[in-house]
Image (cartoon, grey):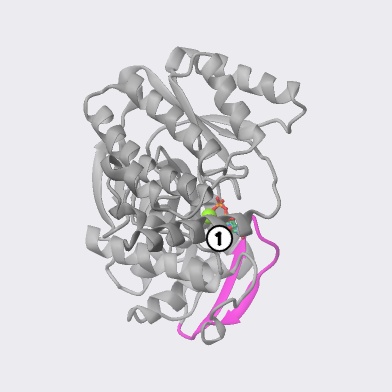
Amino acid sequence: MTGPDTAARLFRDTFGEEPDGVWSAPGRVNLIGEHTDYNGGLCMPIALPHRTYAALRRRDDRHLRIVSAQGDGVVELDLDDVGPGSPQGWAAYVAGVPWSLERAGHPVGGFDVAVEGRVPLGAGLSSSAALECAVAAALSDVFDLVLLDSPAGRVDLAAVCVEAENTVAKAPTGGMDQSASLLAQQGHALLLDCRDFSTEQVPFDLAAHDLALLVVDTRAVHELVDGQYAERRDSCEQAARELGVETLRDVDVADLDAALERLSSDLLRRRARHIVTEIARVEQAREALRADDFARLGELFLASHDSMRDDFEISVDELDTAVTSATSAGALGARMTGGGFGGSAIALVRRESADEVRATVEKSFADKGFRAPECFVVSAAGPAGRDL
Ligand code: ADP
Ligand code: MG
């Protein structure tokens, strides 16, 4: 059954009524520009064909009833009981959205919602933003907020979802995921400038060039990830403070060496070098795409991965193995993507060699005794919207 139908059926089975409609929002994979969002930098995600579906019905009171095919049971609460850290667990990603909409001055009320998630959970492909944005799209329509109809409205919705995730779900994210889910266009990558959240659509039609993007979900589980994310963020902020700039975005790559000499430790030098060079690589990737220079894009993927492994230290053996084995099997380039310490890698491959690259990656994982990875080819899909 399709995603919209599955969500609608879960709604009927749970609540005994018809939903007002079904809305969905995609997960994303970032092509390049990692950990740059909270540094006011650039990143370049695409929306995935994998989406999260929300069948939703508006209520006349302020009650929320939330069910998910990937959650457990029905979560019931009052909208007035939603706040920082409440509710706990997965329902926070849903309940946080109306709370955040109201804080941003958009009047909403209670609703019943049934969720069907087809973005792999916790794989670094942003199932959390897909969930928030599907709910946000639904609420915009059923409460007549008209935020889906314009790019500016969608930018507002993305900010609302970021606030929901940061404050209610208490997960620090920098804004890339929600922008990708609401603003990315089919056949395009979204160049996102996280200094002012301006965007640019960059053509990304690999099939037209007999290429494909292979995602390798390593399914690696690593502990202490939250602390690592906070440490990287703190290091970047400290480096910016020592350099007297607001964010590392303000350091020009041409002045990098001089800037690095002024930092107080080798650790800060490596962290800052990753961010500044990574932002430059995003700009170079945009130029490569505009020139259809995919060999260059592949080189940039590899340089980005090296920087994340050596300078930012967010890779793990599974991600390195995915990158090295994909490259050895003929990928034009590959890199880990997302926050690191597990999650997914991407490889830019010739379409006819996608199966061979996948088989090589799977064999390397088996040889090393890793969990079998999940590999799939993706194209750049469209943003959040109404399905039924
Ligand atoms: P990612 O966004 O990369 O998938 P996160 O840790 O940010 O990883 O978000 C995953 C969390 O989002 C899940 O643990 C769950 O709490 C919530 N979530 C995402 N999709 C769903 C869903 N379909 N149903 C219930 N919870 C979901
Ligand atoms: Mg997430």
Residue 124: x, y in percent?
Answer: 55, 46
Residue 378 shows up from this direction: yes
Q: At 60% from the left edge and 34% from the top edge, which residue is drawn?
A: 319
Is residue 383 part of the magenta span, yes or no?
Answer: no
Can you tell me whether the CB of the residue at mark 1 lies under 8 Å from the nearest atom of ligand 1? no
Q: Is residue 149 left or right of residue 89?
A: left
Q: Quadrant of ligand 1?
A: bottom right
Quarter of the image where the N terminus is located: top right
Residue 347 shows up from this direction: no
Out of 246 and 368, give the one closest to the viewer.
246
Q: Is residue 331 left or right of residue 226?
A: left
Residue 112: x, y in percent?
Answer: 53, 72
Give the crowd class for mark 1: few <14, some 14-19, many >=20 residues within 10 Å.
few
Q: Is residue 91 left or right of residue 97?
A: right
Tag 1's secondary structure? helix
Query: Residue 386, relative to residue 288: is it above or below?
Result: below
Out of 215 and 191, give the one closest to the viewer.
191
Residue 387: x, y in percent?
Answer: 40, 52
Occupied quadrant, residue 258 = top left
Query: Residue 278, relative to residue 159: is it above or below?
Result: above
Q: At 57% from the left edge and 63% from the top edge, which residue is drawn?
A: 12
Quarter of the image where the C terminus is located: bottom left
Occupied quadrant, residue 364 = top right
- Please state which amino acid type lies under the numbered disc 1: Ala
Residue 285: x, y in percent?
Answer: 31, 33
Bounds of the magenta span? 60-78
Q: Which residue is mark 1?
A: 230
Q: At 33% from the left edge and 63% from the top edge, which residue is drawn?
A: 244
